[in-house]
Image (cartoon, grey):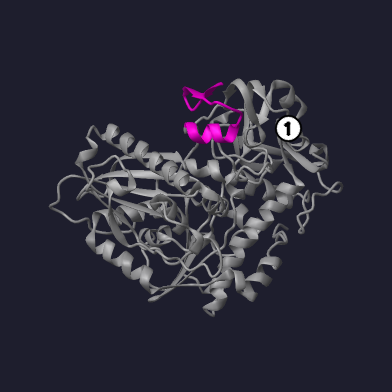
Amino acid sequence: MTIILHGCGRRTIQEYPQPVSLSTVLQESGVSLDFPCGGKGRCGKCRVLVRGEASPPTPQELALLTPAQREAGIRLACMTTILGDAEVVLPSQEEQQILTEGQTAAFQPDSGEAGYGIAVDIGTTTVAAYLYRLGEKEAVAVASQKNPQSLYGADVISRLSQSLAGKKDALAAAIRQCLGELIHSLCRQAGIQPEEVVRAVLTGNTAMLYFLCGEEVSSIAAAPFASRLLWGDWQEAASLELPLAPSTPCYLPRCISAYVGADITTAILAAGYPRQGISLLVDIGTNGEMALLRGEEILCCSTAAGPAFEGAGISQGMNAAPGAIDRVWVTDDSLRCRTIGQKPAVGICGSGLIDAIAALLDCGAIDDTGLLQEEGHPLLGAMAERDGQPAIRLAGEVFLSQKDIRAVQLAKSAICAGMLALLHHAGLKMKDLDDLAIAGGFGQAIPLQSAQRIGLIPPFPLEKIRLIGNGAGMGAGMVLLSEAEWQRSLRLAEQARTLELSSDPFFRDCYIDQMLFPESTLS
């Protein structure tokens, strides 16, 4: 049977001798489609248009589709089996806004070396790559993509489960293909050949490096979570199947533990740490990694906040793409929204989600327990019911449901409780900090006042908060360009300690306490 795929700017034809799951077809064809819940039929995000012979939708699938979607032939890829000749059309995938900018601390690149180098930040959600002329601090080309491993789940835990279930090689192939495409893009932009790249630095969290290297993940997927590998070593490009000269050295910076990866090591460099005073670095993303620095002491943790702020687990959540609501406020007793690219609203991204909940808290539409209120506030006209639960219309056909608010409470309490737990175990409080640096693609876009309003960030002077952007990627560039920074990254990772939160009573209690939203400071 013949299956024709339309998506990602190309037409692909696949032949199969017998019925096959649509998710398998997409994975084997290399077509990028998000499966935020790991293909378990829970999130309803893997929607595609199917024409031809396919299995009938199950009640579970029907419950995740609107009547209009069902009538149009929309199916969930993870729950559909192709039975004969068929045509599959993926949704339009306008390029998401992936953060590639970031702040780099002062450092001196090594001089006297010819050629080019590549630095890459392999994030759980996005991958950002930078091409440098050795000896120069400014990148000559930048490229980025969504991490194609999202086919196997939006978060690390889902992908670890998939790896253990036999997808280890597929996960490696997905990220290696992505890196190959980024390398070719960088070289095209700069007008050079890949053979002119003399070395590369590839940073990422511990699991991402395991996937890249095709390593067996059981040691980091179950207790006691003791990583067999921490890297801090060089590999040849050929061993990673990268389109560079086969012997090109590729450096994987040292991870700190199974929970805290090389991305925090390189972000610490980019943030200019260690510095005078007491500092806290927080990467607000799927894994919620953070580091507390005081003199030579570095205490780290990972909060597994989940991907709510990156769109997964939110009924109409999405990446920061055109049409995503990214700002929300209340004016004249009405909700007002801004969308990326001034396009009609089609969903909401992380910054919009934080803004929306802050605005709803301030006008009394949500109480401190997170419950949507059905009386006593000016937005009663926007209240609705979606899938049997209370919701509120933000713009157009984009709603925020009670379930969405609960997902945000889980994520924000994990981040906030992680910060407070690090401080507690160091005998400190927020007021003792001299500096708070927020890293990560989402961190660059975070509306700070709204983040504090919902309790994602504890009370702290805004003027002491730095948004450093893609610190992991910038730090990887520092390691690439300077032997001194490379050596410093090793020392930082070796002296860092990890606080294991899953068995920490303070974190557990704090996590529960932080589920509540803070009381309003408005008079």
Mark 1 Cα-neighbour bin, 10 Å: few <14, some 14–19, many ≥20: some
Q: Residue at x 77, y 27 (%)?
A: 67
From the viewer's side, name the closer residue of 451 and 31: 31
Report the residue at 27% width, 66% height from top. 487
The amino acid pointed to by label 1 is Leu
- The residue where tag 1 is placed is 65
Position of the C terminus, as image quadrant, is bottom right
Residue, x 48% and y 40% (percent of image)? 148
Q: From where the camera sits, is residue 403 visible?
A: yes
In the rendered structure, the answer to whether residue 114 lies left or right of residue 137 reads: left
Q: Residue at x 59, y 61 (%)?
A: 415
Asked if one can make out residue 458 in the rendered structure from this viewpoint, the answer is no
Provide the secondary structure element on which disc 1 rests.
loop
Viewer-closest of 317 and 232: 232
Q: Residue furthest right?
A: 375
| Residue at the extreme front of the image, as rendered | 17
